[in-house]
């Protein structure tokens, strides 16, 4: 359930807003002074704040500014004076919306819903899914750098992981040991193309059912390796 904080010193207005929002399924808390409102807004988790401008002790400008420093939840500012709304906009405090009193409670509810939906989309889009390659029971999680065979994790060293991922991302192409060594190992690496052979062998032991009849990484005699899809 979305939790909303109302900071409003006119009790009748605060109660009206609270009633309408609760009827729409929101959990609502009210503070009637600026200092208490600010403290609550900063110390507790809310999904949205409705902020009156003129408040005892600390005004809505200050609260909005302080909340913005640490949270990006939607803030709707309300004021009795049209002039004040223009002033708030001009200050660029980062409020998401402004309403002039008196407003209809149902309009407030509609705006609250719209801002919460927009905010949730914003948050949702920030969560990226892991980049995963899946080939017949073999799962390579590129983001977590983990390999699973039929759901069971296989532990890979860095180079084994890089080599397997490189081949799996470029399937059905034959790479020579030279090419693979150049692509996977950097210039400073000690080693030679025999290193590639050793790593291929280790990878096969981890992912192939039968290493003499590999189903993922094939040996193309005299040329190199190919990842089969
Ligand atoms: Ca007021």
Image (cartoon, rainbow, N blue to C red):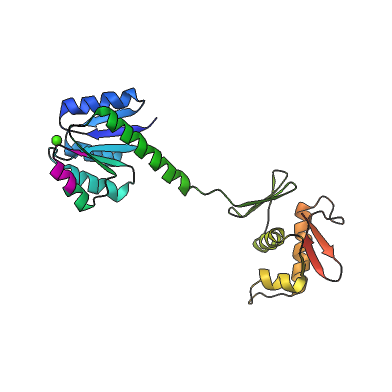
Query: Where's residue 207, x and y in %?
Result: 76, 52
Frontmost residue, 115 versus 200: 115
Q: Quadrant where the N terminus lies?
A: top left
Left or right: where does residue 104 sit relative to residue 167?
left
On the rendering, which quadrant does ligand 1 occupy? top left
- In the picture, measured across the screen, residue 104 lies left or right of residue 227, that is left
Q: Which residue is drawn at 35% across and 25% down?
A: 24
| Residue 177 seen in this snapshot | yes
- Residue in front for this viewpoint, 51 or 215: 51
Q: What stretch is highlighted in magenta?
A: 78-86
Q: Could you tell me residue 171's position as x and y percent?
A: 74, 59
Count all numbered tags in the image, as a single digit. 0
- Residue 29 in the image: above or below residue 54: above
Camera sees residue 45: no
- For residue 4, what is the image quadrant? top left
- Answer left or right for 2 relative to 83: right
């Amino acid at each position: 359930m979305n939790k909303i904080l109302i900071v409003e010193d006119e009790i009748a207005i605060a109660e009206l807003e609270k009633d309408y929002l609760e009827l729409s399924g929101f959990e609502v808390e009210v503070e009637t002074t600026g200092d208490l409102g600010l403290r609550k807004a900063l110390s507790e988790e809310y999904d949205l704040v409705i902020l009156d401008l003129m408040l005892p002790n600390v005004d809505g400008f200050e609260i909005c500014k302080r909340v913005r420093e640490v949270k990006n939840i939607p803030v709707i500012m309300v004021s009795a004076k049209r002039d004040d709304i223009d002033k708030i906009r001009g200050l660029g405090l980062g409020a998401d919306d402004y309403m002039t009193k008196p407003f209809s409670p149902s309009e407030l509810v509609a705006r609250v819903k719209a801002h919460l939906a927009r905010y949730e989309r914003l948050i949702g889009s920030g969560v990226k899914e892991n980049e995963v390659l899946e080939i017949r029971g073999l799962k390579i999680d590129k983001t977590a750098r983990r390999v699973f065979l039929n759901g069971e994790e296989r532990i890979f060293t860095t180079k084994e992981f890089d080599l397997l991922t490189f081949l799996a991302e470029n399937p059905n192409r034959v790479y020579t040991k030279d090419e693979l060594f150049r692509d996977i190992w950097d210039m400073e690496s000690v080693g030679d193309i025999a290193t590639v052979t050793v790593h291929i062998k280790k990878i096969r032991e981890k992912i192939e059912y039968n290493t003499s009849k590999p189903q993922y990484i094939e040996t193309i005699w005299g040329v190199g390796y190919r990842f089969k899809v």
